[in-house]
Amino acid sequence: MILILTQADDVHADAAEAELGRRDARWLRFDPAQVPTRASIAVHFADGRVRRTLHHDGGQVDLDEVSAVWFRRPGRPVPPAHLTGYLADFVAGESATFVGDAWETLDALAVPAPRPVVQRAQYKLRQLQLAAQLGFELPETVAGNHPDAVLDLFNAHGGHLISKQVGLNRLGGGLVRYTEPVRHRDLVHVEGIRQCPVIVQSYVPKRLELRVTVVGERVYAAAIDSQHAHHTRYDWRRYDDKNSRMCPWDLPGDVAARCVELTRRLGLRYGAIDLVLTPDDRYVFLEINPSGQYLWVEDATGLPITAAIVDLLMSATATATTGGDS
């Protein structure tokens, strides 16, 4: 059985479920946010064995039958409504710790990887270090909260820099900080960097931006014409579907191999990699998202990413069946 951990409004999971249904596969979709208010999990150790059961929607599921887990967009456990303040925070925290620990006991293939591995893979500086070791070209980068280092980089590149946040944290109201150019006028506030670390990089001229989705050993690359619209020139995530055209892209074999190897070295079975193709045809690495969205790429290009993910999830079942028959 395949366990899909995600929220109710996840269109990626909807697409995967449709594909699983076409293949007559067994799966369960569950949102951990239901623990402890609307669902319960029991992990029982006895006589050297462990049993795991999930109780929700009036039924019981034997989690020992899970062969693969897809950590798509699992919600964080929500405490009962009658709890407030520190009690609510305590229950939510304990529930989140327990649920995460319970998944770790499963003898199952994890996509993109077990949660602690995913959390570590999100560190951008580690990504850059591994990418450089594999031979990717990188923008010259300064990260931290030391203003002089940023000023030195600014001067070295004639003021042609971009800045982006270090992690995945959101501003008030759930706002996202996009990649932005560093202007001369911004230097008035450079001392503010002491208060919050930042990543600053030399600006890489773009012919195209590439979204490379790695699923196991498979590589699906899409080219984004982000330079066609001013709105997306520095960060295609601002989205301008009308002007930012997208199409499948054939990566050189060595670049594709590096993408697979980077994903593997990070301990992942899935990764969404952002590259820049420069006007003189150099491929420059920016970052990798272990849980990056992909359905928008599939819809725009026809690349069969959902099918590849289902293949990967079902491969654990096929391996178990083969092993049992031998």
Image: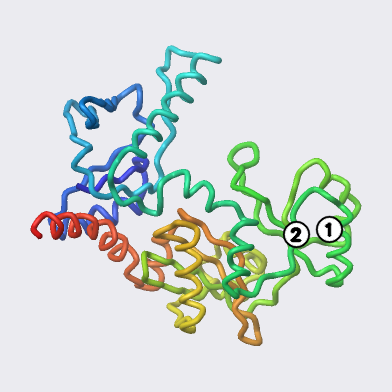
Badge 2 density bin: few <14, some 14–19, many ≥20, Cα 10 Å = many
Lateral position of residue 317 relative to residue 215, left or right:
left
Relative depth, front residue between 140 and 295: 140
The residue indicated by pointer 2 is 200
Q: Are marks 1 and 2 in contact (CB under 8 Å)?
A: yes
Amino acid type indicated by mark 2: Val
Q: Residue at x 67, y 66 (%)?
A: 234
Circle 1: element type: helix
Residue name at image x 29 percent, y 51 percent: 14
Q: In the rendered image of this protein, does residue 309 appear above or below residue 108? A: below
Q: Residue at x 40, y 72 (%)?
A: 219
Quadrant assignment, res 309 = bottom left
Tell me where residue 83 appears, x and y as whole percent. 46, 13
Q: Nearer the viewer, residue 30 or 171?
A: 30
Q: Residue 253, how many percent across, how many down?
A: 46, 83
Determine whether, in the image, residue 136 is placed left or right of residue 20: right
- Residue 286 is tagged as none
Q: Position of residue 90 (x, y in %)?
A: 50, 19
Residue at the image position 19 percent from the left and 47 percent from the top: 1
- Which of the two labelled residues, at mark 1 and mark 2, occupies the earlier sequence position? 1
Three-letter amino acid code at disc 1?
A: Val
The residue that mark 1 highlights is 150
